[in-house]
Image (cartoon, rainbow, N blue to C red):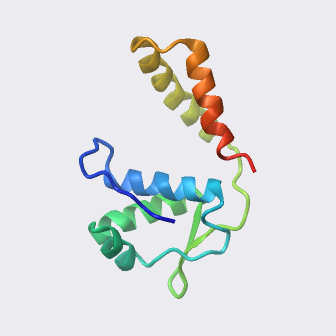
Amino acid sequence: MLIQIDFESDTPIYIQLKRQIIQGIALGELQPEESLPSVRQMAEDIGINLHTVNKAYNLLKADGFLTIDRRKGAIINSSALSLSENYKAELEEDLNYIIAEAYCRGLGKEEFLNLCSELYSKYIK
């Protein structure tokens, strides 16, 4: 999996890294039990600070996507993630903002739903 960081983006680098790893898992590019590069190696590979990688890895661990072992490093979690009420509430909050902005910019409901459907279908296996 190739990580691409947009250094000009308003999105913090650690969030970009976290999102790309989650997308890699969803697309099957990263498999359960697969090891990610060490914090130091990942930072060197993509040219960012190792504390930034560490922050992304720790967020992924907190969300259940990674297991971190001192001997093995960061490993893609093999257990299925649960759909919690907390996650659904966060998702609703995020979607509410995204939909509001799309509406304000003139994106119609059908076009928005088609875009969502198109993007979601990338992850269906």
Quarter-wise, where is residue 42 in the image?
bottom left
Residue 19: % across, % down: 48, 51
Instruction: Compare residues 125 and 32 and report the one nearer the observer.
Output: 125
Instruction: Compare residues 116 and 74 and report the one nearer the observer.
Output: 116
Q: Which residue is drawn at the image coordinates 68% and 39% (left, top)?
A: 121
Q: Which residue is drawn at the image coordinates 60% and 66% (left, top)?
A: 30
Quarter-wise, where is residue 122 in the image?
top right
Residue 90: % across, % down: 54, 35
Q: Is residue 62 above or below residue 105?
A: below
Q: Is residue 46 above or below residue 13?
A: below
- Name the side, left or right, on which 79 lies relative to 59: right
Residue 18: % across, % down: 46, 56
- Name the side, left or right, on which 101 lies relative to 1: left
Instruction: Compare residues 73 and 115 and report the one nearer the observer.
Output: 115
Q: Is residue 94 above or below residue 47?
A: above
Residue 50: % across, % down: 31, 71
- Name the side, left or right, on which 47 lies relative to 29: left
